[in-house]
Image (cartoon, grey):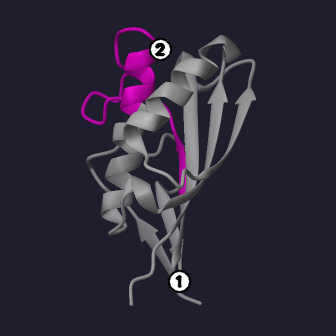
């Protein structure tokens, strides 16, 4: 079993004792991404659409650092502080993914780090050979 830390400056730095992602053989486990701008480390301004878009940008950057793409995500977990935004997230997933879509869970939560309205984490499987 090979274990590799994945890191990119194009996604927010970890705000605690964790890695942006860890690769174990062909599987990459992405830590949760909230809508932080990687340069300022501040939440993006704007509505929930802006927040969801930034989370997808952050996930994409970490995927790319692991030599993968969003299309390589097999499992996506979405955490929302307002489940009323569930439809918007579905709409935006269709903008960022093609069929077959990843397996997914969407959960309503009371709060997220830094007051974010959305957080996502993912599992990527990438055949490198």
Q: Which residue lies furthest to the front in this view?
A: 99
Range of the magenta residues? 30-54
Where, by quadrant of the figure, is residue 66 drawn?
bottom left
Counting from the top left corner in percent of width and height, residue 6 is at 41, 65
Identify the disc placed on residue 25.
1
21 vs 76, nearest the viewer = 76
In the rendered view, would you say 97 is above or below 25?
Answer: above
Instruction: Characterize the local packing of mark 1: few (<14), some (14-19) or many (20 or more) Cα atoms within 10 angstroms.
Output: some
Instruction: Characterize the local packing of mark 2: few (<14), some (14-19) or many (20 or more) Cα atoms within 10 angstroms.
Output: some
In the rendered view, would you say 16 is above or below 110?
Answer: below
Where, by quadrant of the figure, is residue 90 drawn?
top right
Where does label 2 land, which residue? 48
Q: Residue at x 26, y 47 (%)?
A: 10
Where, by quadrant of the figure, is residue 11 drawn?
top left
Counting from the top left corner in percent of width and height, residue 54 is at 37, 30
Query: Does the image show residue 12?
Result: no
36 vs 63, nearest the viewer = 63
Q: In which quarter of the image is the C terminus?
A: bottom left
Helix, strand or loop at label 2? It is helix
Q: Which residue is drawn at 32% across and 29% down?
A: 37
Identify the disc placed on residue 107.
none
In the rendered view, would you say 117 is above or below 75?
Answer: above
Counting from the top left corner in percent of width and height, residue 87 is at 59, 20
């Amino acid at each position: 079993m090979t274990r590799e830390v994945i890191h990119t400056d194009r996604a927010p730095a970890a705000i605690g004792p964790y890695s942006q992602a860890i690769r174990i053989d062909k599987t990459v486990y992405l830590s949760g991404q909230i809508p932080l701008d990687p340069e300022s480390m501040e939440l993006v301004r704007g509505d929930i659409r802006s927040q969801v878009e930034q989370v997808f940008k952050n996930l994409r950057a970490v995927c790319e650092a692991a030599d993968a793409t969003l299309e390589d995500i097999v499992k996506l977990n979405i955490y929302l502080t307002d489940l009323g935004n569930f439809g918007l997230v579905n709409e935006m997933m269709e903008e960022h993914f093609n069929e077959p879509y990843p397996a997914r869970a969407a959960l309503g939560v009371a709060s997220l780090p830094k007051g974010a309205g959305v957080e996502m984490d993912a599992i990527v499987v990438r055949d490198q050979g």
